[in-house]
Amino acid sequence: MDSEPRGIRAIDYDAQRAKLMVQLEDGQAYVYVGVPGEVHRSFLEADSKGRFFQAEIADRYPYNVLDS
C-alpha cells in the first residue's frame, strides 16, 4: 500500500473475528485481521478516513486483498 491517503468507499467489521473490511474508491478491497473494536470505532469517527486508514491501519495489521 502506498503512503497517500486514499478515498474510502466502504467499511465493515466482524467483531467476533476482529476482521475489518475496507473498500477503496478505486474498488480494491482489503480484509485486515486482528483489528480491535476500538480501532474500528475510531476509524468510523475519523474526520479523514483516508488519513486514519494510512496512519492507524494500513501498515499495522496483516491483511488480504479481496478479489474484485
Image: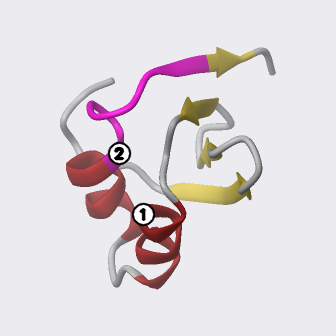
Q: Look at label 1 and name its amino acid.
A: Val
Does 62 sit left or right of 68 as displayed?
Answer: left
Q: Residue at x 51, y 75 (%)?
A: 41
Does 23 sit left or right of 49 as displayed?
Answer: right
Q: Residue at x 27, y 30 (%)?
A: 59
Residue labelled with disc 2: 57
Mark 2 element type: helix
**Looking at the rendering, which quadrant does residue 28 occupy?**
top right
Percent position (x, y) of residue 57?
Answer: 35, 45
Q: Which tag, 2 or 1, sits closer to the chain's start? A: 1
Q: Residue at x 61, y 30 (%)?
A: 30
Above or below for 45 versus 57: below
Q: Which mark is residue 39?
A: 1
Percent position (x, y) of residue 25?
Answer: 59, 49
Q: Residue at x 38, y 31 (%)?
A: 61
**Looking at the rendering, which quadrant does residue 39 occupy?**
bottom left
Above or below for 1 versus 17: above
Residue 5 shows up from this direction: no
Above or below for 57 versus 39: above
Q: Are marks 2 and 1 in contact (CB under 8 Å)?
A: yes
Predominant secondary structure, magenta span: loop
Front disc: 2 or 1: 1
Q: Quadrant of the C terminus?
A: top right
Q: Quadrant of the N terminus?
A: top left
Nearest the camera: 7 or 1? 1
Q: Residues within 10 Å of mark 1 (few under 14, many from 20)?
A: some
Above or below for 6 versus 66: below
Q: Which residues are magenta?
A: 57-64
Mark 1 element type: helix
Does 1 sit left or right of 34 as displayed?
Answer: left
